[in-house]
């Protein structure tokens, strides 16, 4: 209750409009972003591990990474794992994750992101 007005006035940062630990909508958004769209952060590195059907080819959404705006675009062809990642028109290196149950995603290091990211909108294109 002590900081309720800060929350109400938008002075407290929240992810997706709700705190992730909240019930219902917050949990849903976390599952959608993390496990379907495949956007996660681990030790300041960006994990791109989408699980999307071919019919969502061309899907894009906006998000933030370390306070920087990003737009993620999905190019889905054969859906057999991430083949290429392009950030701001530059193909970047990545490490492929391991997953014994399906084609795995990739991890792009913070160091790589620091080189290619700008303070403005950053376009991340994932080719699958």
Image (tube, rainbow, N blue to C red):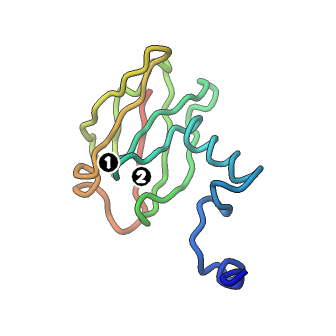
Do the numbered discs 2 and 1 sit on residues whose CB atoms are within 8 Å? yes
Give the number of callouts.
2
Q: How many angstroms separate mark 2 from mark 1 (CA)? A: 8 Å
- On screen, 64 above or below 39? below
- On screen, 10 above or below 115? below
Q: Is residue 61 left or right of residue 94?
A: right
Which residue is under mark 2? Answer: 123
Image quadrant holding the C terminus, namely top left
Q: Residue at x 63, y 55 (%)?
A: 20
Position of residue 105 measured from the top left corner of the image (x, y, whole percent): 42, 29
Q: Is residue 94 left or right of residue 66?
A: left
Q: Is tag 2's residue or tag 1's residue first in the polypeptide sequence?
A: 1
Which residue is under mark 1? Answer: 89
Q: Secondary structure at mark 2?
A: strand
Q: Residue at x 60, y 81 (%)?
A: 11
- On screen, 78 above or below 43? above
Image quadrant holding the N terminus, namely bottom right
Foreground of the two, 95 or 54: 95
Q: Residue at x 36, y 27 (%)?
A: 97
């Amino acid at each position: 209750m002590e900081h309720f007005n800060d929350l109400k006035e938008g002075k407290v940062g929240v992810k997706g409009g709700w705190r992730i630990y909240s019930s219902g909508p917050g949990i849903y958004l976390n599952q959608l972003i993390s496990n379907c769209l495949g956007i996660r952060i681990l030790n300041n590195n960006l994990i791109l591990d989408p699980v999307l059907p071919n019919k969502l080819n061309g899907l894009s959404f906006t998000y933030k990474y370390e306070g920087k705006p990003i737009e993620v675009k999905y190019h889905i062809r054969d859906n057999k794992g991430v083949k290429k990642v392009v950030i701001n028109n530059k193909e970047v290196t990545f490490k492929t994750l391991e997953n014994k149950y399906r084609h795995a995603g990739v991890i792009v290091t913070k160091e790589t992101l620091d080189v290619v990211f700008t303070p403005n909108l950053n376009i991340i294109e994932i080719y699958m």
